[in-house]
Amino acid sequence: METISVIVPCYNEEESIPHFYEETRKELLKIEHTNYEFIFVNDGSSDQTIHEIKLLTLQDPCCHYLSFSRNFGKESAMFAGLQRASGDYCVIMDADLQHPPTLLKDMYHVLKYENYDCAAGKRMDRTGEGGMRNFLSKQFYKVISALTKMDMSDGSGDFRMMRRVVVDAILEMKEYNRYMKGIFSFVGFDTKWLEFHNVERVAGQTKWSLKSLFAYAFEGILSFSTKPLLLAGIVGMLLFALSTILGLSIVVRLCLQESISASFYLLTALVFLSSLQMIFVSILGQYISKDYLENKKRPIYIIKESDNA
Ligand code: UDP
Ligand code: MG
């Protein structure tokens, strides 16, 4: 029998976890000829999350957990969970029931009978979210898609069921600066999108502040695009063109025996030198960018305890 692994990053989700488990297990049992396993990843919660998870592992041998030594972020939790999962299919789900478990059966059928490698949830709306956050998120996805030329559309989150082969590919990406949406897009494979409506979280609060969303946005752009570094090069080229025009005007005015002020010479020289600087900064940036991602060989997470220690 095939196994479906459900990976659940949890950060201060003590209230959501029991609901999540009940609802999700109910749906998993409806999927014929499969076993399930839950991998809860406690991402350094400061509430009773780990207690709730341990209760589940006591009552259901198909529940497993990892617990981080501190909060490493959802990206690290997802990576750790995928590493631990042993299923033929893996699905990543938020603990707050914002990812409807009713979709699991459809996802499984897409992978099993429709020859896709990946069945991904696509949130159709942002009901219940603030207008400002909604607007900024939309703009961000436009910018990042243009900069990276990868499909990272708004609404395509981390809720997706994948075949083992996709999971193995994702695990091969061992970079420290992890941006899962980019990684999904980078590894490729055939993906079918299944639409769902946004629902409010079952309990607790969102872990995202506007500040952390901005940080996440920058992470996404820096991890998957080096285009911002080209900006220096473009500005450098423009300054170079300007200095050429200024230089030519000096030559023409000298030929016409017009007088030229010392400050005009100075300005031309300054623009010229700045343009060279900008161009070389941009070239340097391109070299550094190649090394940038891979050089930070810090551990992606540190496990404090897990149930198979
Ligand atoms: N999460 C996590 N570590 C973090 C932040 C969030 O593991 O540092 C988990 C959280 O417990 C939830 C999921 O990631 O299961 C999504 O978080 P949240 O619901 O706060 O995000 P939102 O749905 O508001 O985008
Ligand atoms: Mg949520």
Image (tube, rainbow, N blue to C red):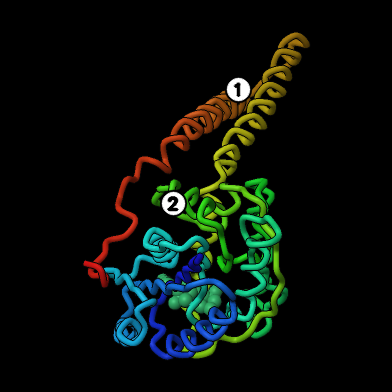
Give the total number of marks visible in the rendering.
2
Specify few, some or many for label 2: CA neighbours under 10 Å numbering under 14, 14-19, or 20 or more.
Answer: some
Residue 127 vertical placement versus 116 (above, below): below
Residue 277 point in image, percent of width and height:
51, 29
- Real-space Cα separation, disc 2 to disc 1, in angstroms: 58 Å
The residue under label 1 is: 265
The quadrant in which the C terminus is found is: bottom left
**In percent of the image, x 66 and y 52: which residue is there?**
190
Viewer can see residue 214: yes
Q: Which mark is residue 171?
A: 2
Viewer can see residue 219: no
**In percent of the image, x 75 and y 8: which residue is there?**
255
Residue 288 point in image, percent of width and height:
44, 34
Does dot 1 land on a helix, a strand or a loop?
A: helix
Residue 152 vertical placement versus 127 (above, below): above
Seen in the image, is 168 located left or right of residue 299? right
